[in-house]
Amino acid sequence: MGKLHGSPKHWPYLALIGVARLVCLLPVRCWLGLGRGIGHVGYRLAKRRRRIAEINIRLCFPALGEHERENLVRQTFLSVGMLAMEMAYCWTRPIDILAPRMEIHGLDVLREAQAERRGILLVGGHYLTLDLGAALLSTKVDLDAVYRLNKNPAVEHLMLKGRKRFCGRVIERNDIRRAIRSLRDCRLLWYAPDQDYGIRHSVFAPFFGQTAATIATSRLVRLTDARPILFSHFRDPEKGTWSLYLQRIDNYPTGDHEADAKHLNSLIEAEIRKHPEQYLWLHRRFKTRPEGVPSPYA
């Protein structure tokens, strides 16, 4: 860790990862249970993120009553807590140990695409099994991943080091050239286009009935002739198991970026609806608005 060890402001993060390493030696359902506890605390203390989740869920699930919306927000925080423990596990422990707890659906889809000897774009979403889903898939295939740089150098160091344990190349999201190189090298690249990164390289497309700035993923597919495959993953916290799903994306891309973004959003939305509490509602998904439309987070 070098310089990170010497800076007191980074010590809490280092202490947390040290504790997490010990906790992850416990049985799976024990550390998932601890994750739920972390989520309870987060729900109480992270007021800003809770408000963002409340706004997102109100916009995306208008038919839900107030009590149902509140429960979904709370369950989302519990799932975030479990995500934290899953990250700690796959960043520090052998992922093969969890492989028997994985069910993978559609591996034949991936094998068929690999036989074509072209790059494969695994189109994912910010499901709250983010790292563990990719780590479990890595027990079957080699893959690269696109991620967002963390502003905290201690967290960035731990995250990068942890993800390199199960990803061949870990590519910062602004490094488009490296992402293109990965696909042109006929590798699998995990990529999640479901967050709001502003209007640059994005188009507006519906997402849960809301107008959302959506990365024009079809441009990357057309540029590299990659095979797009939808990748989703969810946990069963009661059983301590995980399910991975790989699905073909048909009739994509079409050349119409807005239509392609709408199609991709609809596929990701359908996956989220299966387990809505296991999605990252804490992100300001609708912060970029068409001209003249106010932000819902103001």
Image: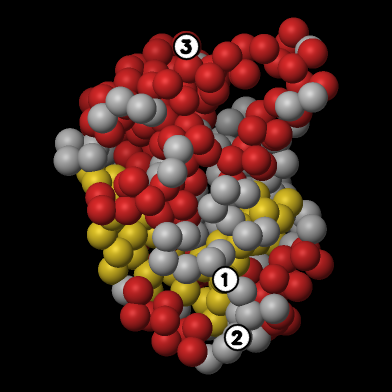
Label 3 neighbour load within 10 Å: few <14, some 14-19, many 20+: few
Q: Mark 1 points at which residue?
A: 188
Of the numbered discs 2 and 1, the one sitting upstream in the chain is 2
Q: Where is residue 9 in the image (x, y as percent from the top left)?
A: 73, 11
Give the SS element for disc 3: helix
Of the numbered discs 3 and 1, the one sitting upstream in the chain is 3
Q: Quadrant of residue 220?
A: bottom right
Q: Where is residue 176 in the image (x, y as percent from the top left)?
A: 77, 64
Q: Residue at x 75, y 73 (%)?
A: 181
Q: Position of residue 97 (x, y in %)?
A: 34, 46
Q: In which quarter of the image is the C terminus?
A: top right
Name which residue type carries label 2: Arg
Q: Residue 45 carries which label?
A: 3
Label 2 neighbour load within 10 Å: few <14, some 14-19, many 20+: some
Q: Which of marks 2 and 3 is in front?
A: 2
Q: Residue 118 carries which label?
A: 2
